[in-house]
Image (tube, helix red, strand yellow):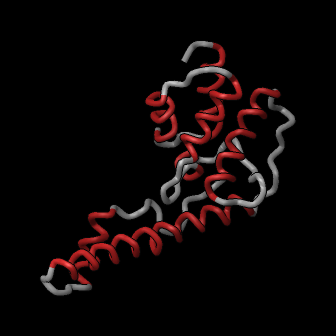
Amino acid sequence: MLVPPSLWPPPDYETWVTEYQARFSLSRFTIVRWFQQWCRTNEFRYGCLTSIENELIVQIVNRPPPDMAHLTSVQRKILQILANAVKDEKGIPTVPPIYLDDPLGLLMWGVDDLTPLIFKLEFQRRFRVRVDSDRMWEEIIRPGATVGDLLVFLLSVLRGSP
């Protein structure tokens, strides 16, 4: 199971900028302010958030494959779609192992991460069903939601009773 990175939850951008401004106060000129804001944003995004994402990727990659013998072929196919979405979005060279108890919030989190969208579109394409985006998003961001919970939700969509 994935565990939260050392800096979790990610800091709020506004709070981070306020602390940044307290450390670095530059000139009042507009061009300098624009450059200062650009530096703040990049440091937050690529310094702070990328380190969190990299810590998650290391965890995801360095796990043994899970035992999927008890899963049906449809369940395995859904997990394969999710694993491919994580691989493609996070730039992982091989398909990562996905466990049913993995927290969705961590698995789908990243800097400009489109994993939920990539997964949803591929799921809809493969199974020829329509998934309500709001309902799926609620399932993903629900506190304590796991991959197993998402699997139950998607199986109910396939049965026609979301």
Image quadrant in which the C terminus is located:
top right
Q: What residue appears at the point 66 percent right and 21 percent down from the top-left corner? A: 128
Q: Position of residue 107 (x, y in %)?
A: 59, 50
Q: Please, which residue is most extreme toward the right here?
A: 69
Hey, which quadrant is residue 61 in on the image? bottom right
Relative to 3, say whether 16 is above or below: below
Q: Nearer the viewer, residue 145 or 24?
A: 24
Left or right: 25 with respect to 116? left
Give the side of residue 43 with respect to residue 158, left or right.
Answer: left
Where is residue 144? Give x, y as percent.
51, 42
Determine whether 42 is above or below 107 in the image: below
Residue plotted at (58% across, 34% down):
120
Q: Residue furthest left?
A: 28
What residue is rendered at 28% in x and 71% in y? 17
Image check: 43 left or right of 62? Answer: left
Using residue 159 as the reference point, say whether residue 30 is left or right of it: left
